[in-house]
Amino acid sequence: MRYGIFSDVHSNLEALHAVLSVYKKENIDKYLCIGDIVGYASNPLECIKIVRETADFCVAGNHDWAAVNKFSLDFFNPIAKAAVVVNSKQLSKEEEDYLSSLGLTYEDEYLTLVHGTLQEAGFFHYLVSEDEAIKTARLMKTNLCFVGHTHRPEIFEIEKDVVSILRLECLKINKNHRYIINVGSVGQPRDGNWRAAYCIFDSEKREVYIKRIEYDIKTTQKKILKAGLPEFLATRLSFGR
Ligand code: ZN
């Protein structure tokens, strides 16, 4: 089985189009989305429509739930909050119902998905420390857990209770280890690379790839400004911050 796993689209339609066009050449059997379809950029409706049509399963991100009042905006900085408010005004009942229906976790025979961490998934903690990686690893029923939320692609490899942090384009899975794989962000990368991030997991070859693809960033930036969203949300995209 070949999985296409992506996260943090954040209403960036041009980045989502670019990622899906490269996935089309990759013989993907199953698409999974790790949440935050909306927020930050200007095309929440279009991105929700595409994710609904494409993804076999999608878990909730903090922005998805905040847009439908299932998660408090008090946890957001003023710029993120402003974008959630602008995005949520565009949603019809149908999109609201879809975002509300997203659950916090997903599990199949190979992998688990959660936006932040498995411990207190509904609080959307950032999985950035070894300590949090171990807490999530203890709750994993599969060897692999795919996460998003930080917008920085990285891999936590856990052997017993020792964590190594890897930044690789291709990971060969050791079946005796556990892995928490942050797939990065389609629509607003924050690792200093502006290109959209996406992940492929091949369960037969036991390989995980985290790749990058250029997209029409100028159009996204123009649309962000035209929508009256904070200017910083346009400029940051150029720097991948
Ligand atoms: Zn996000």
Image: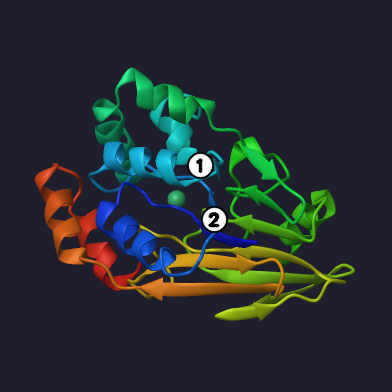
Q: Position of residue 107 (x, y in %)?
A: 71, 45
Depicted 192 relative to depicted 217: above or below? below
**Callout 1 secondary element:** loop
**Residue drawn at point x = 41 percent, y = 74 percent:** 212
Residue holding disc 1: 61
Q: Which mark is residue 148?
A: 2
- For badge 2, the amino acid type reads Gly
- For badge 1, the amino acid type reads Gly
**Residue drawn at point x = 25 percent, y = 43 percent:** 43
* Outermost residue toward the top in this view: 93
Q: Position of residue 28 (x, y in %)?
A: 52, 61
Q: Which mark is residue 178?
A: none
Quarter containing the C terminus: bottom left
Q: Position of residue 151 (x, y in %)?
A: 47, 61
Q: Badge 1: few (under 14), some or many (20 or more) residues near its Cα, within 10 Å?
A: many
Q: Is mark 2 within 8 Å of ligand 1?
A: yes
Q: Give left or right: position of 55 versus 205.
A: left
Q: CA distance from mark 2 to mark 1?
A: 9 Å
Q: Position of residue 135 (x, y in %)?
A: 79, 54
Q: Is mark 1 within 8 Å of ligand 1?
A: yes
Q: Is residue 129 visible?
A: no
